[in-house]
Amino acid sequence: MRLTWRNRQEEAKAPTARFVVQAGPDTPFTVRFEPQGTQLELAPGDYVIVEWPLVEDGEPHGGVVHAPDGLTLTEPGGGAAGVWDSRGRKLDILGR
C-alpha cells in the first residue's frame, strides 16, 4: 500500500475589484482593451463586467482612459484581469 499526502490548502487568490462599463440608454459605446487591441461595441444600455486585480495597498493596476468616443482599458500586468458580457459569459479578451 502506498500513501501519498497532498497539501489541500488552496492558494490564496489576490484581491480584485469588479466594475461595470455600461453604454448610455440611447447611445452605443466603444470599449477598447490594450495592449490586445480588441474593441467591443456596446449597444445602448448594454454592459460588460471587468475584474481588476488590486495591489497590496488596495490600489488598482492598469489604466482607464475616457474619451468622447469610448473608453480604453489597459490590462494590468500579469494577465490577471477578466471580462464578462451582460449574459455572464467570459470573454476571451484579457489575460484570465
Image (cartoon, rainbow, N blue to C red):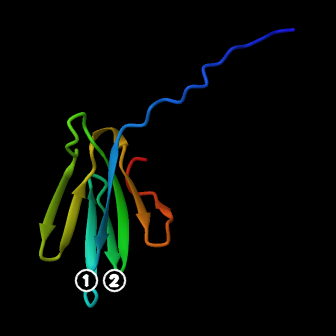
- Residue at the spot 20% in from the left edge and 67% down from the top edge: 71
Label 1 crowd (10 A; few <14 / some 14-19 / many >=20): some
Q: Quadrant of residue 2?
A: top right
The disc placed on residue 45 is 2
The residue furthest right is 1
Location of the N terminus (image quadrant): top right
Q: Please tell me whether mark 1 sits on a helix, a strand or a loop.
A: loop
Is there CB contact under 8 Å for labels 2 and 1? yes
Q: Amino acid at mark 1?
A: Gly
> Looking at the image, which is closer to me, 29 or 34?
29
- From the viewer's perspective, is 92 left or right of 26? right
Helix, strand or loop status at disc 2? loop
What x and y, as percent, mark residue 38? 33, 62
Mark 2 Cα within 10 Å, few/some/many (few <14, many 20+)? few
Residue type at tag 2: Gly
- N-terminal-most mark, 2 or 1: 1
Q: Which residue is mark 1?
A: 24
